[in-house]
Image (cartoon, rainbow, N blue to C red):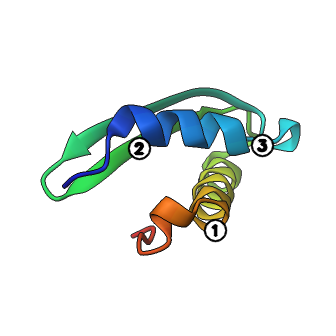
Amino acid sequence: MDLDPNLVLRLLWRNRLNIHRVEHIRVRAGPECLLIAIFTVSADQSEADEVARRLINSTITRTPELRLWRLL
């Protein structure tokens, strides 16, 4: 993998909106992937999962360098 986890971390913070209510983001390299942990202020796990999905997908969409990346 050739994508710097710190770059992805900065991109996620840059694309975060106040409505996402994100408190902490961690990105680290995994085996052939990036592992992303996002801590939110959410009513339940389902809402937290949706916030994380929206943030990651919007970051991928808005960043040309990530155009070939997908959330699994």
Q: Quadrant of residue 15?
A: top right
* Residue where numbered disc 2 is placed: 36
The mark found on residue 50 in the picture is: none
Instruction: Estimate the x, y position of residue 57 in percent, counting from the top left.
Output: 60, 64
Residue shown at 69% from the left, 52% from the top: 51
Q: Tell me, yes or no, if residue 27 can be seen here.
A: no
- Determine if residue 29 is in view: yes
Q: Amino acid at mark 2?
A: Ile
- The image quarter containing residue 71 is bottom left
Residue drawn at (42%, 75%), measured in percent from left and top? 68
Q: For mark 1, what is the residue?
A: 61
Tell me where residue 56 sits by quadrant.
bottom right
Residue tagged by mark 3?
20
Question: Residue 40, how many percent across, how many down?
Answer: 66, 34
Tag 2 secondary structure: strand
| Image location of residue 20, percent across then percent down | 78, 43
Residue type highlighted by circle 1: Thr
Closer to the observer: label 1 or label 3?
1
| Foreground tag (2 vs 1) | 1
Relative depth, front residue between 66 and 21:
66
Q: Amino acid at mark 3?
A: His
On screen, 40 above or below 70? above
